[in-house]
Amino acid sequence: MIGLAQSRLGMAALLGSAGILLGCLASAAGAATGGPGGWLNVRDLGASGSEFETAATTTAASKEITVKDVGDFQVGQGVILSGCHIHYPGRFLWSDAHSRKPLEDAVEIRGYDGSGSDWMVFILDVDGAAPASFRWSDDVARTWKASRVPITGEWQLLSHGVEVRFSRRDWKPGDMVTFYARNSLHTTIERIQGNVITLKDAPNRTGDAGIVWHEESAAIQAVIDRAAQEKKNVFFPAGHYRLARGIDVSRASGITLEGADGVNTLLDISCPVGPTEVSQTKGAARGGVTVFTLNGGTEVTLRNFRMVGHSGLAEKAGTVTNPAYSIWGMHIKPCNAVSIHGTERVLVENVHASRMSTECFFALGGGRRGAEEPRSYTKSVTYLRCSVSDCGFNAFNNNDISESTSILYCRVENIGNCFWEGPGRFIRIIGNYARNAGVCAAGNYFFRDEHLLDLGVAQTIISDNVFEGVSPNRAAIHVGHNAQQVIIANNLFINYGSTGVHLDRQDKSDFYVPGRRVKSTFPAGQVIVANNIMDLTYNEPKARPCTGIDIGLSDVIVSGNQVYVRGGPDPQVTGICVREPAINVNVHDNLVRNCGAGITTGRVEARVGQVVDDRTFVRRGRDLPQGGRDSHLYRGWSLAWLGEQGPVALSTIERFDPVALTFRLRDPRPMMEGDRFEVFPPSASWSIHDNTITGCLHPVTLDCYGSDTSLFQGNIVERGGATGVSAAVVVAGRFQLLGNSISGFDEKGAAGLALAPDRFGKAPVRTCRGNTLERCSRAVDERRKGLWKAAAPEGNRFIECGSRPGR
């Protein structure tokens, strides 16, 4: 039924996209013929679309430059003059990740010799006090050239001739200075006489190394503004349109911006003026370095463009982390393709972006909060047949609770962070291809807002996609941080070297965002993972441990999946893992082959933070989900205190406060900060049934606390081609073993079933009934005498086994 439902979902998406395509064809015909309502052509209204460039000779402080060839330059056009204008824009002093102010005279700068790029980024991060010192980077924090450099108050050399002089002030760790060293001039042609061009602004260097390019942002912006006012659409003929500033589309009631095609209509923002030269605020800064920024309005369509920025995967910005805060380096040198701010309906079709340093396609704005609905917000964003390649950060990003984002039949390849990240509502990610593309992150809404309990967030369908290669953040699909109602179905994983699906138990607790300190989030849940085929064969030298499906959430169904490795078993691969303290987990009808570990279970450790009294403590760490007002909140759960060798004592939890992050125990206990513990429920409600596990080195390991409602039932466990397997099924927690078939573990000393004491030294199996063990050297390995009898065996069959219990 799940497979049928997913097929219907895929068909609905296909039919819907077919309708969109028909509309696109009609729109393209309108663009070519003038169309209803008329079209404006950017080439007719001042934009050149020309890729022509020429060498230039300049004299410092003179507006006149001599060019090798005037080419198609015209008076009034914008130009970029590269290689002959040194300046230091973007100068800011940071005190935390979200607060910066103009640098003013805190640090003086001089000396850039132009030997680097046209746009170099310098970061000075104060890393010591008494005496004050700093470290510095000239590549957006990818590397740090030096650290603990004393702040002398004199001129200090960095690189490429750049020198800085710190003012006499109280510098402390957490203070950070950023600035650009630029070697380009953005200006306008005022006159052309022969090979002499007079510019509006004068360069400040003398030499013959200048290059002049067309720059189209002012001309295109004028066309967009006119089209919005006249309610017309805009056509971009094939051409190379260089942009010094991004294009704003504000409050459009219905507009289409369309290129001739997605190959030859190039919008190039590789040499912008830079965000901090546009605005001091991050939100407005995005508009300055974004090809198209959509601000409000009812409906916008973008179609048939190629867009290129300034920083690919090889130039991916690093992260500045100091004792006071952490900041993504991409915010210091950003650029992206499309940024949506509250526009109600958006279609982005056949748009192909590369070398964007930040979130390539980005959305930010308001949304519904329970019964509260804003006057306007984003209700639908569709990305259709787009591509993102060679980018430093995310491909698609929703940073709000807008609704109905659909990513359909797109290609994402070689990016530095997430394929998709977003807490929006009603998300569809269908029919895409992703290679070395980062994680599809459903959730990532890092607040504990009560309205989420009414309407939820990050309801997501991820289906019919293909994932290949590896993920820079260790998983292809991640569900966590408030996500609810998620379906992951019918996806293919080909030669995949990272975890396929990670259902993440962690909450995002005790961190800072502008104006708020977030103590915790709601846990994710209500997830179906069905009918995926995961080929985790990865032969690259940097292969690392990975899991097909890693389950740390409650209320999860995992069914009908295949997880396998081609050839012999890979010891670094786990098929399916279920981790406590998840409850209500159903894992059934999966096929796991040739993995190091087939199906395994695990526990989660946490630590005591502040001790309030002898019954109350604050939890430290992020591994335990917090729960909402209708959840269990750990009432009546067990808490095992850990020593070096395992549990040393057991407490019962009276309640948990998910806002204050405090556990209260039923009985007093001596505690101290840093004490380790694990929690487990009185009833886990795990059903692991009707799976087939074959060819694995460690086929099944049930090593968790378990419960009377933890069932391992009706599974087929077979040795296949694996060698050196010591035991087929290892049980070290409370489970019922019912009707399983275990066969072929006939190597010397191998056991079909191994029973080990649980964490408290007790018998692990509550019921062992109706199992068949065939062709095993030892039917049962009791790792302590009496465990088999304690399992209340009944109706088990032993066929051609070398030894069996009681003999």
Image (spheres, rainbow, N blue to C red):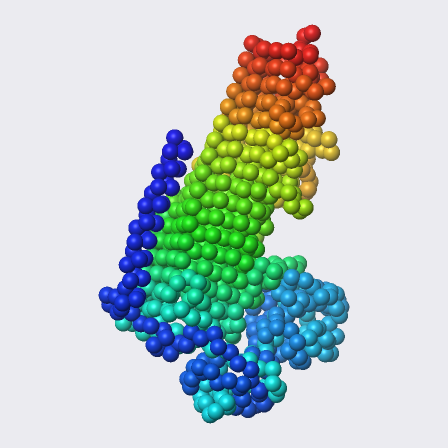
Hey, which residue is sitting farthest left in the picture?
36
Total numbered labels placed on residues in the image: 0
> Which of the 4 image quadrants contains residue 599?
top right
Q: Picture quarter containing residue 669?
A: top right
Please say whether residue 787 is visible from this viewpoint.
no
Where is the C terminus found, in terms of image quarters? top right
Q: Position of residue 766 (x, y in %)?
A: 58, 17
Would you place residue 138 above or below residue 52 in this image?
A: above
Whether residue 78 is visible, yes or no, is yes
- Looking at the image, residue 25 sits to the left or right of residue 413; the answer is left
Which residue is at a point 50% across and 33% down the rendered structure image? 561
Q: Where the N terminus falls, by quadrant? A: top left
> What percent of the width, then of the height, locates residue 16?
32, 48
Could you tell me which residue is drawn at 51 percent across and 29 percent down? 590
501 relative to 140, above or below: above
Task: Judge left or right: residue 154 versus residue 207.
Answer: right
Measured from the top left, where is residue 435 in percent x and y?
A: 53, 49
Q: Residue at x 52, y 26 (%)?
A: 691
State left or right for residue 313 relative to residue 405: right
In the foreground, 305 or 52? 52
Name the residue at the top extreme.
807
Q: Tell me where residue 490 appears, x and y as whole percent.
A: 45, 38
> Looking at this view, is 502 or 568 the one in front?
568
Residue in the image at 55% along x and 22% along y: 716
